[in-house]
Amino acid sequence: MSTLNDSSGHSYCLALQPICDLNLRHVADELLYRSSINAVSAIIHDPIQATARVCNVAFYETGIQALCGDRKLFFNAPRDWLLNPDLLPPDTDQVVIEVLEDVEGDQEVIDALQLIKSLGYKLALDDFVLTEKTLPLLDLADIIKLDILHSLPTPEDLQIYKEKGLTLLAERVEDHDIFEKCKALGFTLFQGYFYAKPVIDHSTAIKRGGNDGAQLQLLSELQKKELDYDALENLLAQDPQLCIRLLKMINSPRYRR
């Protein structure tokens, strides 16, 4: 099996973990990074780099329809990505942005999430723990993902979530007994080994390379106050894969304007 290689010789690919509803129907997937096609879990040394790789492969090379059809796709976004919405995936109607557990509800984050919501994305709070610092996030969230492996949420917390009209997603559901308990508590979405383990998408494990020299010259050229479009065109022509990615991004619904 071939692997997906970046210019530094590292290999990486994508995995998907299904999310089901009350009737055990496959309704969504979580997009996961894998450092190699043989990796059984995520090994992430640089969250920003991992997110960039996932976003590039999923949305600009493979395409969301090829990955998951019409199902929702949950995409993990670190704080730095939330603060720069131009980095977010292009498929606003189908992508659920997961706010990671280490993100707190300070004003900078709240402003960024309000903008993201205005663009049409749904927001999920991943591995959410209710504290004074995370409470403001509830007013912008659509989905709460709760890790129920070791304990179920308190009735008081559940009441707060339900009063705000949030969809409850139970993650790390390991068996059907826990599934039934979560159903009784009001959860309507479920993710865990009881239903399906993450599966590497082998279509993303392809050989890949790029023209590092041309890319570095492009970055240098783009820093200039007065752009030389002829020079940019010549540099882009030296990296066909980059051209294809740009064309896919330009043709996405997000940039229809």
Image (cartoon, helix red, strand yellow):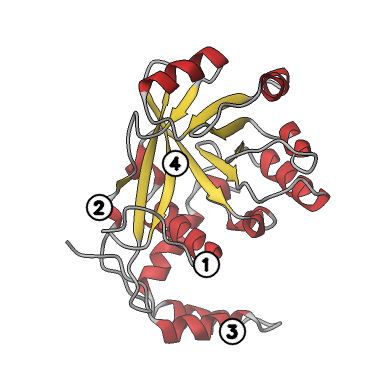
The residue mark sitting in front, 1 or 2, is 1
Q: Crowding near pointer 4: few (<14 within 10 Å), some, many (20+)? A: many
Q: Secondary structure at mark 3?
A: helix
Say which residue label 2 marks. 202
Helix, strand or loop for disc 4: strand
Relative image position of residue 146 (x, y in whole percent): 56, 33
Q: Are marks 1 and 2 in contact (CB under 8 Å)?
A: no
Q: Position of residue 15 (x, y in %)?
A: 35, 49
Of 184 and 161, the residue lying toward us: 184
Residue at position x 42%, y 62% in the image: 245
Question: Who comes first in sequence, dot 2 or dot 4?
Answer: 4
Q: Nearer the viewer, residue 23 or 238?
A: 23
Q: Which residue is mark 1?
A: 46
Please report contact status of discs 2 and 4: CB closer than 8 Å, yes or no.
Answer: no
> Which numbered circle lies on residue 30?
4
The location of residue 145, given as percent across then percent down, is: 56, 34
* Quarter holding residue 79: bottom right
Q: Is residue 118 left or right of residue 121?
A: right
Q: Residues within 10 Å of mark 1 (few under 14, many from 20)?
A: few
> Do the residues bearing badges 4 and 1 touch, measured as CB atoms within 8 Å?
no
Q: Dot 3 corresponds to which residue?
A: 221
Q: CA distance from mark 2 to mark 3?
A: 36 Å
Kind of residue at badge 3: Glu
Amino acid at the residue labelled 1 = Asp
Can you tell which quarter of the image residue 226 is in?
bottom right
Q: Give amino acid for label 4.
A: Glu
The residue mark sitting in front, 1 or 3, is 1
User: Quick one: quadrant of the N terminus?
Assistant: bottom left
Residue drawn at 42 percent across, 50 percent down? 32
Relative to 177, residue 94 above or below: below
- Whole-angstrom CA distance, mark 4 to mark 1, is 19 Å
Q: Is there CB contact under 8 Å for labels 2 and 3?
A: no
